[in-house]
Image: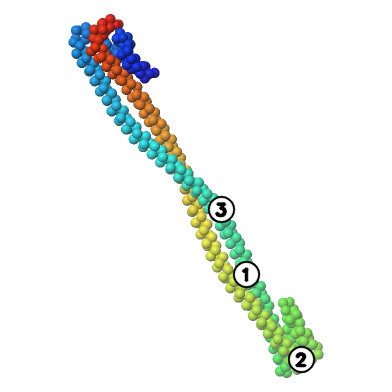
Amino acid sequence: MQKIALLALVLAVTAAKFIDTHTTLAQINADPFGHVVLSAIKAHLQASTPANEVNMLLNGVGAGLVQDQNDHDHAFELDTTTNNRIVEDLEKEILYHQNQIASNTQLRDDTIEALAVSEEDIRVTISDIANNEATYAREEATRNQQHETFVAKVAAIDDVIDAIDEAAKLIQHLSLGASFAQLKSKYDVLHKKLSDNTSHTALLQPVITALTELATHGVNQKALTKIAQLLSEIRQQLVQEKAAKTDVEERQAAHWAEFSVHLANEHTRLVERKAQLEVQIQEQKDTIEDAQSWIEFHTLELENSEERLAGQQAWYAVQSEIYETQTAERAAQNEIVDRLQEHISEKLSTTAQFISKRN
């Protein structure tokens, strides 16, 4: 409103060229500044001061207005320079905090995704460790059972071989002339041993039958030779059977030795992998927590910088308005001084008459 009034005054003074002197002076007198200047002129005129001194007074007022404007221009220029520097710094701060928020948000989100992968990896790894341990326990139990079975079967074969060897000795003694009656006790023990055997019943049955016939029908060389041949064949079969089982046992033992090493190495690898993933997961959780803390920190700093920028811009807007208002006031005041100088120079008597009669 004050700007509009001052502009109206300037227009009014400018239009004074086309308005009579009394009207012009009345308009100047209505302005507070014009009223003060007219009062000063009146005092000079009442003291019968020469017109040139009145002009000197007006020149001094005009020079003061020019100096005031120059000072104000300089001060506003400094304010503008300072404002631009502060605004530039604050805008850089805002951009920095925005970039930090964006980069830490990206880091947090990427790490959350990576954490999900790591947690799935460790879940699978833990499951693999459990499967590995279960496989080891199962295969070890199988291997132990295989070995126990082998030991039992080999022991049974050895028992049968021992019985076959005893039978062969018995037949040998009979072949060399010993009487059956002399060997009857050994025969009975051997016959019972062979009859009680359950592991090779079918294999031993021909021997048992032959020995029974020997005891029933009496000893003859042909029968003894036949039995000796039968015992030799059976013993050879038993030795071959034992060799075959031993070969299987050795292959199974070698396989388990190799497989157990593989399982142990795999277990070590999985346990190490689990430890690595645990460290990785903790690091990822720390990264997420740190990133979130930085996001919160830079968010607060961003809000602070934005508030300071808004405050600085508001302050500069006020300073700009003050500068424009005061500049307009001084322009209007300079116009008043110029018009009064014109009237003093060209229409001194009329001006003096108006001043002497005004309130």
- At label 2, counting other C-alpha atoms closer than 10 Å, the crowd grade (few under 14, some 14-19, many 20 or more) is some
Label whose residue precedes the other's in the sequence (1 or 3)? 3
Name the residue located 74 percent from the left edge and 86 percent from the top edge: 187
Mark 1 and mark 3: Cα distance apart in space: 34 Å
Residue under pointer 2: 223
Residue 287 badge: none
Q: Nearer the viewer, residue 50 or 74?
A: 50
Q: Amino acid at mark 2?
A: Ala
- Left or right, residue 48 beside residue 213: left
Q: Secondary structure at mark 1?
A: helix
Residue sitting farthest toward the right: 217
What's the distance in space between the residues labelled 2 and 3, CA to CA? 78 Å
Secondary structure beneath disc 2? helix
Q: How many C-alpha atoms fall within 10 Å of the one at disc 1: few (<14), some, or many (≥20)?
A: some
CA gap, disc 1 and disc 2: 46 Å
Closer mark to the observer between disc 1 and disc 2: 1
Mark 1 vs mark 3, foreground winner is 3
The quadrant in which residue 258 appears is bottom right
Spot occupied by residue 318 in the image (x, y as percentages of width and height):
37, 25
- Specify few, some or many for label 3: CA neighbours under 10 Å numbering under 14, 14-19, or 20 or more: few
Look at the picture and state if 331 lies above or below 99: above
- The quadrant in which the C terminus is found is top left
Q: Residue furthest top?
A: 357
The numbered mark, 1 or 2, whose residue comes first in the sequence reads 1
Q: Residue at x 55, y 68 (%)?
A: 261
Task: Tell me the residue that label 3 is attached to.
Answer: 120
Relative to the observer, which residue lies in front, 191 or 230?
230
Question: To which residue does mark 1 refer?
Answer: 143
Contact, mark 2 vs mark 3 (Cβ under 8 Å)? no
Seen at 34% across and 32% down, the residue is: 83
Q: Residue at x 28, y 18 (%)?
A: 334
Q: Which quarter of the figure has residue 72?
A: top left
